[in-house]
Image (tube, rainbow, N blue to C red):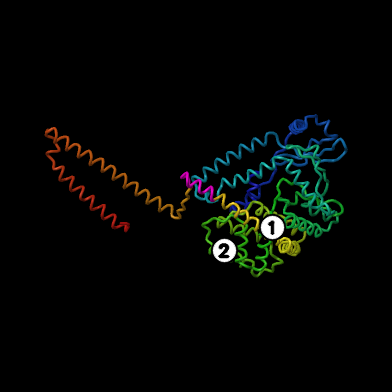
Amino acid sequence: MKIGQIASTRPDIIPEDIIHELEKLQSQASPLSYEEVKVSVEEEFGAPLEEIFLEFREVPLGSASIGQVHYGVLKSGEQVAVKVQRPNIENIIKTDLEILQTLAVLAEIRLEWAARYQVTAIIEEFSKSLLAELDYRVEGRNADKMAKQFEDKRHIRIPEVFWDYTTKKVLTMEYVEGTKLNDIEVLREEGYDLKVFSNRIANAIFHQILIEGFFHGDPHPGNISVLPGEVIVLMDFGMVGRLTSDMKDNFASLVIALMRQSTDGVVKAIMRMGLVPDEVHMQRLRLDVEELREKYYDIPFSEVSIGEAVKDLFSVANQHQIRIPADLTLMGKTLLTMEGLVERLDPDISIIKIAEPFGHRLLRERYRPKNVAENVLNQWQEYGEILIDIPRNIQELTGMLKKGKLPLEISTPKIELFLTKLDRISNRLSFSIVLLAFSIIMVGLIIGSAIRGQSSLLWNVPAVEIGFVVALLMFLWLLFSIFRSGRF
């Protein structure tokens, strides 16, 4: 279930129809018994449950594939939500991942498409994401980091982590009793202005993506609550995305190219974003991007869905086997989820207008003289390091040459033709060796019979004449083959 959910965030490597089916997977697992939860918590803290919590409700608030959440009250009186991991789930998941890894290796050996899409690398990426979710301390650190992003914004709240009651398998956070954002009718009955929530959520996500470079990877309505005073609470930080400065710059370049409807600009942005195979057909890539540009040609840019456009571009990248970093595809998934949410709250909202100030800020930072100077300095430092390394590299190369251990890599674009010719050469060589052995045996028999002076069936057959004729025919055939090959 978790592999399917994570895989649904990779439209650059998985076809859209499969993505659509994977998105239907929900973490609706059967709940653990209270006794199992009690044992797990007591093993983690090394103390009876009654000594840790003043109250711990037996009925869970929610149950998922990896763990489930219970309401509790600490001895100090704070209300908390306690997430408890399922017993032995780590061993089960690791076993499943090992099986998947073995199947991926076999698939790459036997199936051409599996090798082309590097299925083993995909499974390794999914395994890393899934294993990170098994350590609740990671989720706690993610929550703390996001809390710092919004510490000066009173309308965005992140529940506090109680680290004294948090371990690898138990996460204790502040309990927030609000109205889920998917309860739209309830929100209306309570008199909330849904447009305010729509605007604040979009601003929060764009701030995380374009400014902080660290964002919530799954902002669906079930992970967002509303408190009195129109305060938005973000929850569940198991899946997060991280963007480097280069990733943010490349995404900004992509958005600018989309605004200008520049095919070359879009192609360059995609090439900088992903891992491009050597055999990519640039002309076909440009044609596909041009076709995609026509899709948005007559639509005002203010009405364009950034998430949908990014998803379409990643689909084009998938067709040309261009591997996009996982965090960028997660960003595209996050934008799509966020857009669907805010448009439900406010159908008239313009995502582009909200994103525009962040884009301008990003561009100003990119071309700020101080940042430009730092980039130039960094590049010169890299060039300087290359120049400094030249004498050492030459020395190493000289040493390898002296030892006769120079590694040689040969690239053969027409490997199939090369192997076919090599096979023919080996067959001819084998034929020649067999013929030579036959000739030696025949000569030995003839000479042996002549020396002993005994009659033999061979003396009744003109073996010498027949051998001469056979040898002459083979010699002529060999000359004909050489001249016909044009490699005399």
From this viewpoint, is residue 350 visible? no
x, y (%) of residue 209? 72, 55
Q: Does the segment drawn in magenta span residue 401?
A: yes
Q: Residue at x 13, y 43 (%)?
A: 462
Amino acid on which disc 1 is placed: Lys
Element class at badge 1 = helix
Residues rendered magenta in the picture: 394-406
Which residue is pictured at 65% across the width and 35% down the height?
91
Residue at the bottom extreme of this rendering: 298
- Give the side of residue 340 with respect to residue 313, left or right: right
* Residue pointed to by mark 1: 248
Per the image, label 2 sits on a secondary structure element best described as helix
Along the line of sight, the residue nearer the viewer: 91 or 409: 409
Label 2, residues with CA under 10 Å away: few <14, some 14-19, many ≥20: some
Residue 24 visible in the displayed image: yes
Give the mark nearest the N terminus, 1 or 2: 1
Total marks in image: 2
Q: Which mark is residue 288?
A: 2
Residue drawn at (37%, 51%) of the image = 421
